[in-house]
Image (cartoon, grey):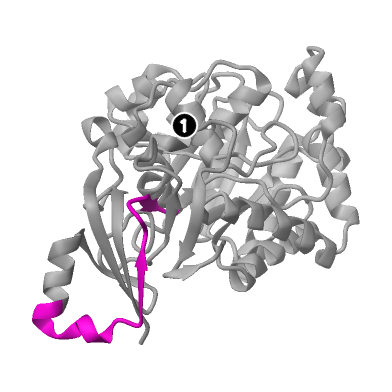
Amino acid sequence: MITKLFRNAAIFTPVDSGSPKAGPRQGAVHVLDRGALLCRNGLVEAVGPEEDVLRRLASTGHDKDIDQEINLQGRCVIPGFVDPHTHLCFVVAREKEFSLRLQGVEYLEVLRQGGGILSTVRSVRETDEWALYEATYRRAMTALGLGTTTVEIKSGYGLDTATELKMLRVIGRLGRETPLDVVPTFMGAHAVPEEYRNRGDAYVDHVIHEMLPAVAAQGIARFCDVFCEKGVFSVEQSRRILKAAQAEGLGAKIHADEVHDLGGAALAAEIRAVSAEHLLTAREENLRAMARAGTIAVVLPATAYSLRKPFAPVRTMIDLGVPVALATDANPGSSYTESMPFVFGLAVLMMGLSVEEALVAATLNAAYAVGTAARVGSLDAGKQADFVVLDGETPAVIAYHAGVNPIVQVYKKGEKCTP
């Protein structure tokens, strides 16, 4: 057994009480000005004031069992970021599309013309599995260096059975061959592929009757997501797909009300989806329904920033009791960033979250949004020792010291992953 003592740390962490934090509890963070973290075999054994942890070790005689003692020199320690919404598995970036959007071309118009998601689909279909893995690996390691220790990655750039399964194999491999905990999500309903142009219902049937059974048999994906949006998939089409996914044992997620308010948030509440994501245009009544259902709002400030859209109404969400989580939406089109610190800063400076609310949203609530809260998201005894050391005394440094990486060290299961 390997035992490590991390001491002289300013520890900021949510405390997991068995459900995501919502309403007045959204910013509930436990603070230890001079704290210590005792880890054994990659798990947190004790966390508390340094003098209490040392006294406990001495009283039990376990102070002699410590294999390594690390003085963190008063720096801030927070749980590792959990990024609950990404599209990291792709090959080619889309800089030209970015320039078009700067000239005023709308995102959905780019998609209608065969660009956007469909251009990435063409490149992913043409790329062999090894090259796709290498490209995704590089981005995943960038995310790790920026403090992300658990990441959800969606498929959805295949839009045919063989390529979707290829993507899920790549995503699953990342979870085996990197320090990251990786949560794979099947998103065959990311767009209607060119071969099904003007035949959306037929493609929905294909997703339900061929793709979903194959994905379930493969056994890698844990969730199913759908892009419920005008010109993509309707509420009724999304309902059919997500209910079929639930019948196959997959959790339900939904890209909802990003550009147009179709009522995707209401659908998320109706089917008790784990999360609804984006929500820039969601109506208050549908957010209330999400609060009643316990559906988590995964908000993506870097996407609104990139698309130059109004940010999601997080203050309304919190006032209504909707648990809020933060994610990068890392993808080659609308949010090309792997940086949870950047997202954290946007949430605080542009969306009105407090530092504490943003911390909960980027850790514990995000872990609940991807079904990993039993293991990660907070520095509670029994959970994995996943944490980051910041170049500052409080989590405020993430937003305060803008434009740089505030992460000094990243630890996964008690092992240092970065210099």
Foreground of the two, 268 or 78: 78
Q: Quadrant of residue 47?
A: bottom left
- Image vertical order of residue 377 relative to residue 312, above or below: below
Q: Is residue 75 above or below residue 265?
A: below
Q: Report if residue 389 is visible in the image.
A: yes
Region in magenta:
58-80
Nearest to the observer: residue 207 or residue 119: 119
Q: Residue flagged by tag 1: what amino acid is it?
A: Ala
Q: Quadrant of the C terminus?
A: bottom right
Q: Residue at x 88, y 42 (%)?
A: 195
Determine the residue positioned at 25% across, 66% down: 381
Q: Nearer the viewer, residue 310 or 209?
A: 310
Quadrant of the rendered image containing residue 285: top left
Splitting the image into 4 quarters, where does residue 404 fall?
top right
- According to the image, label 1 marks what residue? 399
Quadrant (top left/top right/bottom left/bottom right) for the N terminus: bottom left
Question: Alpha-carbon neighbours of circle 1 within 10 Å: few (<14), some, or many (≥20)?
Answer: many
- Left or right side of 32 for 20: right
| Residue 282 x, y percent position in the rendering | 47, 21
Query: Does the segment drawn in magenta span residue 79?
Result: yes
Which residue is at 21% across, 52% downward? 17
Residue 82 position, x and y percent, is 47, 50
Residue at 75 percent across and 17 percent down: it is 106
Q: Is residue 40 above or below residue 202?
A: below
Image coords of residue 62 (percent x, y): 19, 84
- Local SS, label 1: helix
Say whether residue 189 is magenta.
Answer: no
